[in-house]
Image: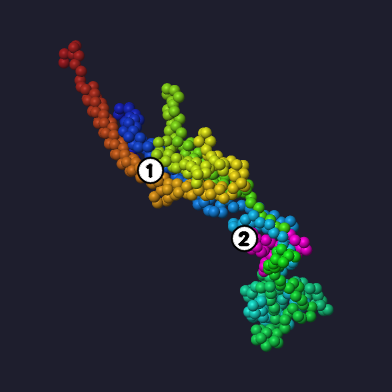
Amino acid sequence: MSLSLDGLASGLDTTAMIDALMDVQAIPRNLLKAKADDKEVVISHLQTLNTSLQDLLTKATAAKKADALAAYSATSSSDAVSVTASAGASAARMDIVVDRVATAHTVVTAALTEWPEQPPTLTLVDAEGNQTEIVASGTSLTEVAAAINKAGVPVTAQVVSAGVDANGDPLHRLQLVATATGTAGAFQIYRGDAAAVDAGTATDLATEAGAAVVTQAQDAQVRLWAGTAAEQVVTSSSNTFDELMPGIDVTVSKATTEPVTVSVSADTAASAKTAKSFVDAIAAILKRIDEGSKATVAGSTGETTTLGVYTGDSTVRALRRSLGEAVQHPVGGVSPSSIGVSVDRYGVLTFDAEKFEAALADDPALVEGVFTGIAERVETVATQYSDRYDGLLTSRITGQESEVDALEDQIERWDLRLEQRRATLERTYASLETMLSQMQSQQQYLSSQLSALPSYGKGNNR
């Protein structure tokens, strides 16, 4: 807490005088603080640039893959068949006939008021012959369904209302549906335990009076080149035929009598969009560097020249040059501008989607080679500068942070020194005020004593 004795004896504003003296004393400290603040701004911009560069590295790693530009559009001549093209696909065309779709095995039991045995015991046998005994806690069909659903078997059970019996009591059925389509999901469910099933004395619920197999499990089936000597039958446990052709999945929804034509063709527009996204990421970094390197020169007397955050930064300047060269230099003797990647007269990286699509349609291998080459060079540059351990830009940021730490240490020492200096000034001025007050008291005392002395006039003879 500072000591304030403003005007105690002198009437002077000693606090203002001390503040003025401290302002002069604090000039070196304030210069250090301003320098540290400037470096903090630079560090923030460098960190943002480094983050963008790391994002670009990720994109470059993906862009250099052989299938980075692979994009295909898939069509079908019928809504009974849908086509999906993924990585590894190529242009293709084929006619297929859908003989049947995959179905899930479904069984409905006879109508019951409650389960006839206590406790209800069932045995489920799957398509591979594995047996699972299920015991319900009660005789209601709701309890039986719950036991089946908790047994971990590949079947779900639902209770369905089935009217009333002759006595007016409510009837219910169990609908049992395989969780997977295809013959692999087929099952049988018996009334009785596993021993009874093995002995042949258990009753198949689907064969009881009023019960039925509603849907028999079957695999989906299509025919390729139907009606020719090369006709081929292909089956699937689901309605999706994965990799019917490399990178092409076909999904069927209903049977057809006539062949359905499925076709896959290269989607140059999608490929161009992928390439543009990558080039735009590079262009954004180049633009950030260019804008951060601009300096506003004073136009007249009294104005100041303002430097950009990257002005004079050799590391950032070298990064800008390396990225520019990675995009502009020929790849295998082919200029990137031939596929629409070029730098205009203002130094701005641009992408011509129309030119890229035309080049891709004309010579896909050439375009992919140039694009991959650019991506590999950009990846190298991004790694060199943004590596988290020894990247050039990372090291630049670390160095700036170390300088800020050193400045902060100096500022802390200056703060302590200034605090001590203010305390000294306050003590000095307080002492002066005290001494002046004492002198004023002495003056008043002497004045009072002098005034009390007798006075001897000229006419006084005594």
* Relative height, residue 234 to residue 25 (above, below): below
Q: Is residue 250 magenta?
A: yes
Q: Position of residue 91 (x, y in %)?
A: 64, 55
Q: Residue at x 44, y 23 (%)?
A: 300
Q: Position of residue 449 (x, y in %)?
A: 22, 25
The label number, if any, that marks residue 357 in the structure image: none
Return the residue nearer the eye: 266 or 305: 266
Q: Residue at x 48, y 44 (%)?
A: 326
Label 1 element class? helix
Residue 263 visible in the picture = yes
Q: Is residue 174 magenta?
A: no
Residue 118 visible in the picture = no
* Relative height, residue 257 to residue 435 (above, below): below
Identify which amino acid the numbered label 2 is placed on: Pro
Q: Is residue 291 left or right of residue 178?
A: left
Magenta residues, start to end: 236-260
Return the residue nearer the eye: 379 or 166: 379
* Relative height, residue 266 to residue 240 (above, below): above
Q: Residue at x 32, y 27 (%)?
A: 11
Q: Is residue 123 left or right of residue 324?
A: right
Residue denoted by label 2: 246
Question: Which residue of the protein is positioned furthest toward the front in this rendering?
Answer: 229
Chosen colour scheme: rainbow
Question: Which residue of the protein is positioned furthest toward the left in this rendering?
Answer: 462
Residue denoted by label 1: 400
* Image quarter hosting the C terminus: top left
Among numbered discs 2 and 1, the one appearing first in the sequence: 2
